[in-house]
Amino acid sequence: MAEANSGYPESGDSWLEEAQDAEVLIIYDPDDKLRIEKYILQYLKKKNIKYVIPDYHIIHDGIEIESITNAIYRCKKTLIILSQSSSSKIPVSLEMILALEKSMKTNRMSLMLLMMDGISEDDIPKIPVMLNASRIKLVDNIHERCLDELVEKLRADVDLTVALPAGNFSSGMVWSHFLGYLKNILPGLPTAICDDCKWFNPDNVEERGRMPVCFFMLLPASGRAPTDINHEDENIRQVGHVQILCGKRPFQPNVYEVTDPEDGSKYYCCAEYPGAFCCLGAICDLGICNMSPQQRHLEVERFIYQMEGILNHKENPQFRGLAKLLPYNDENKNSQTSLPSYHLLRAIKGELHKATPIVERLLQTQISRINELQTDFKFHVCLVYDTETDSDKNLAEKLRRVLEEKGVRCCQARSQDPPKEIENRIRESRWIPMFISQSSLKSTHWLQLWLAELLSLSASEGQLRVLPLLVDVQSSDIPDFIRWVTYIDVQKEPNFCDRVLQIITGESITLESQVPVGNVAFGLAWSFEVNYLHHFLPEIERLLNEKLKTLQVDFDNSVCLSGVLYEIIPKSCQCQSSLAASDKDNIIKEVASLKYKKLVHGTQRLFHSTIYLLKGDDDKDYYFVGEYASPVKTLYNMNQSMIAGLNNEQLVKQVREFKELSEAIQNCQDAPEKRRNKCKFVYFDDTKRSLSSVLYEKLKGKEDKGIQNYWKQRKNAEPDQRK
């Protein structure tokens, strides 16, 4: 067993190996080293707490921490010690914050703060990863009692957060909605409306022009859709559906009747509240995720921006003009603009009377973004970059020259500048293009906690927008506290300066490069939870038991894993039409379907899964409910897409993160007990193992703790029905 460090190890010591066996990773400002060693670390040694301290190296004006992310992932707890003089000088890097965020989101690690010198809650850096940490105050007159509390918490089981921290929701939600729904319905929408929809009647003079060939997406600021839209707005009611068949799969987008309150005339349109989008409201209602109103508003804007980018991509000409996003503030109940009918009516009339609706739509978007730029800020742009990184510095200088030539007012916030000057320049600017590279990710002298707090708070208050410019890193390397709406991969876009100009001036953009995807796993996991598992999991046991009563089986040699849904996640993300279809061993058989209807977000949803039979080597028949996890199919389609920037390396990373995030959501302390542990995520390398062998291991008992044998219950409770 590795021994605890007694201080900072010499360069070359393998401190990272000790992290594997340590109970806690301890991080503090080197200026506090002597007193922390004298009082706190000595006390932890006395109590036999095994701790590890990072290997610090002084470089230039900062500190380099080698392998800090690996240490965070290896340790179950991380303790950050804050003092009055150094609460904003803790040696952190973007890479370290990113590791803390990811560990907390998947409940792999607990973050604790030890607060010395009488510092208060207000002194804690206001970034989500810090605000979600548990705290202990070290008070001088009860010093030993406080340290005893610290030891007790360090020895306790991992202190998982009650509510999971928020992350990047919209990226996954947008791609899920586009690939799973819009991509299927939009190409067939004109035919479905013009040829088969009774509300579209161009031959009737009175009704001519009352229904546009366009699909409207209602995007309320709350992220919530009414169960019955007529109860929310008397000027609108659902009257039916249009039928769109994509392959063998039917789709039925809603048709609404909208009444003009001025003259009583009636208009019709095909519209819906996007199910993926409405996850935002559902997540807040469930209470198992710490999402603030500011974060929700950011996600609404991010959803709009990314969806526009996909629909207007040069590779998607077949979608042009067929979809319109209608964001509105439904939280201001005293205004008619809070009603969906107000926005639908304006959009319908606008589409009906425009020869080129897509041009007008983009123009409206452009005008709104230009208006946002017309603020009282002193500068349009503040370039944030690390001057110790030559590539970042050179790219920043290039961007500054291009923008200033176009009349954009620019300033710079460089790592060499005094903190007060950096703060003033950022607060005086509307947009913050921020260069992130491998070097700046690891730097501790550039993005310190005070600057991270400034960027996070300013973005939350709507005072600025951070625009990450990625040099040699991936989109998943953008920490959550950077509230970005979109980002630019500099290496993939040689003309990145023009893209920055387009974004900050509000010029309408038809993307020619790949659409930024961000960390899609987070949004996919939450969308899967609130749009599917939340509704279907509570019904599975009832549906399964009802269905099994109709089947002819050998009761004595059968095992039914009742109430559990198995979600299969192959590493390659390649999913067949069913589990049986992909079983090369031919021992998985499809038995029956489970179906359940429910009204969700104002739309009748059909939830369905499949009962399978697996014949085991122990001569038992295992009945279970299983399926390929649908978000895995989304990831695979993104990887295959010409417009989604998700390469093979990112695909593997994202599918693992989806699995870990989904498990964290299922096991969260605030998740309803009746749904906890009701879903098993089975990840396996399908290039090395067969699906049937992996499932047999799971079904045979390795993960069956607490699952009852349905047949034994039935034989005892219903003996007469066996005859």
Image (tube, rainbow, N blue to C red):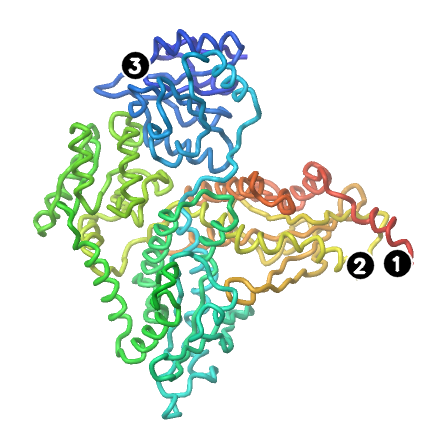
Q: Amino acid at mark 1?
A: Gln
Q: Earlier in the sequence, mark 2 or mark 3?
A: 3
Q: Compare residues 585 and 398 and report the one nearer the observer.
A: 398
Nearest to the eye among marks 2 and 3: give it. Answer: 3
Q: Which mark is residue 721?
A: 1
Q: List x then y, in percent, for residue 340.
A: 39, 68
Q: Residue at label 3?
A: 31
Q: Classify residue 189 as left or right of residue 573.
A: left
Tag 3 secondary structure: helix
Does the residue at mark 2 contact the one at mark 1 (Cβ under 8 Å)?
yes
Quarter of the C terminus within the rendering: bottom right
Q: Which mark is residue 549?
A: 2
Quarter of the N terminus within the rendering: top right
Q: Amino acid at mark 2?
A: Lys
Q: Earlier in the sequence, mark 2 or mark 1?
A: 2
Q: List x then y, in percent, for residue 14.
A: 42, 14
* Residue 327 found in image quarter: bottom left
* Residue 351 found in image quarter: bottom left
